[in-house]
Amino acid sequence: MDFRHDILPLKNIIFRTALRIILNREEAEDIVQDTLMKLWERRDELEKVENLEAFALTMARNLAIDRKEKMDNQHVSLEEEEHDRADDRQGNTDSGVMRQETRSFINDIINALPEKQRTILQLRDIEGKSYKEIANVLSISESDVKVTLFRARNEMKEKILQKKSFFL
Amino acid sequence: MDYKYIEQLLESYFACTTTLQEEQILRSFFSQEDVPGHPAQYADLFNYETEAKAETLGEDFDERMMACIEAKEEKVTKAHIVKLTTHHIAPFFKAAAVVAMALTIGRAAEHAIGEQEAEENSNVVAVDPYIKSSDVRQAIRVKDVSQAEMKATNDSIISLATEDGIQ
């Protein structure tokens, strides 16, 4: 087990998944660090782990859910973070700005979903994972994954159609 | 491009019956600049999905992470060294115990022999009938052996001391 070759490459998928749960970049980065460190500490056990990525994602998700709960209890405001994100996006042309606004709209409606729905949506539609892998990460059945994804996708569809009719 | 096919795929997508490959086809389709007709309203969704996968950590992350790992490793190695040292010292404790025992036995033997000799000397004139000459010889031999032991233990103490010095 080599840190740079076996564990470090998991950083970005862990980051995106943790970010989808905790909705704060700094916190998500901390979770990546903690997860990678824990994996390295347990490297002797990892030889037996069938799917290292799923194992790492389960770990990261648990950490993220814990921290999110603590943050919510402390009423940490995420508004500032949202502004930072909007500023980060480059929009030089008018159409560019418009496109980013709609993308931000999609981001917002995904992030408004319950945690389980947005994590599953993240793993399926953004990371391109199979139902089996997702079930493994969340320790639930594949049919549970499908049902939850169904709800998430249809909520998205509804919000997109609502927005459309609002502008028409 | 046959939009009917895309419409069908969209329907399957929202019914969660598309395969991963079909979902990839949808994303590729919507990445075209101008998507015409009814499917266009979902362009943002699929383009968002494509873009969101490009979200990565900053370049400085690796450096910070490796520094964390190295700091951790150093701690672990140090702890390991301490453990090793106690391990290394353990046989010396045993050796020291053996030396101490040899010394005690040696001293005791010497003491006993000394007493015996004194007794012998005082009894030379009287000629104690209970002391046979073989006993005396035995005693002398024991004394020689204990002296040899003393020398050996002294040597080993010296060698231990030098080894310790090297350590």
Image: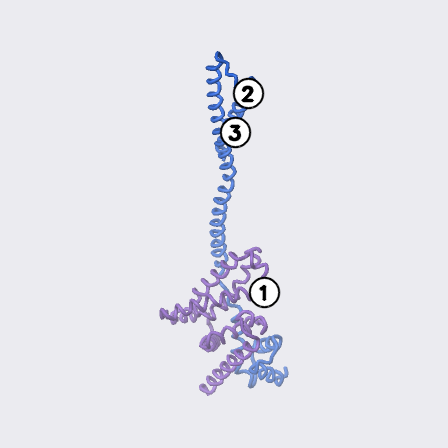
Chain colours: A purple, B blue
Q: Which residue lies furthest to the left in this view?
A: A74
Judge depth for marks 3 and 2 and give the one in front. 2
Q: Considering only order in the chain, which callout, 2 or 3, is on the residue closer to the N terminus?
A: 2
At x 49% / y 50%, what residue is drawn?
B76
Q: Can residue B4 be seen in this view?
A: yes
The percent position of residue A16, horizontal first and vertical second, equals 50, 68
Mark 1 residue crowding within 10 angstroms, few (<14) / some (14–19) / many (20+) = few
Image quarter of the N terminus of chain B: bottom right
- Amino acid at the residue labelled 3: Ser
The percent position of residue A35, horizontal first and vertical second, equals 49, 61
**Which residue does the numbered mark 1 point to in the structure image?**
A51
Work out whether residue B22 or residue B73 is closer to the camera in this orientation and state it: B73
Judge depth for marks 3 and 1 and give the one in front. 3
Q: Can you tell which mark lies on residue B156?
A: 3
- Circle 3 sits in a helix, a strand or a loop, which is it? helix
Q: Is residue A101 visible?
A: no
Work out whether residue B102 or residue B51 is closer to the camera in this orientation and state it: B102
Numbered disc 2: what chain? B
- Amino acid at the residue labelled 2: Asp
Numbered disc 1: what chain? A
Mark 3 residue crowding within 10 angstroms, few (<14) / some (14–19) / many (20+) = some
Q: How many labels does the image show?
A: 3
Judge depth for marks 2 and 1 and give the one in front. 2
Mark 2 residue crowding within 10 angstroms, few (<14) / some (14–19) / many (20+) = few
Q: Determine contact: label 3, label 1, CB under 8 Å.
A: no
Work out whether residue B17 or residue B99 is closer to the camera in this orientation and state it: B99
**Which residue does the numbered mark 2 point to in the structure image?**
B135
- Amino acid at the residue labelled 1: Asn
Q: Can you tell which mark lies on residue A97?
A: none
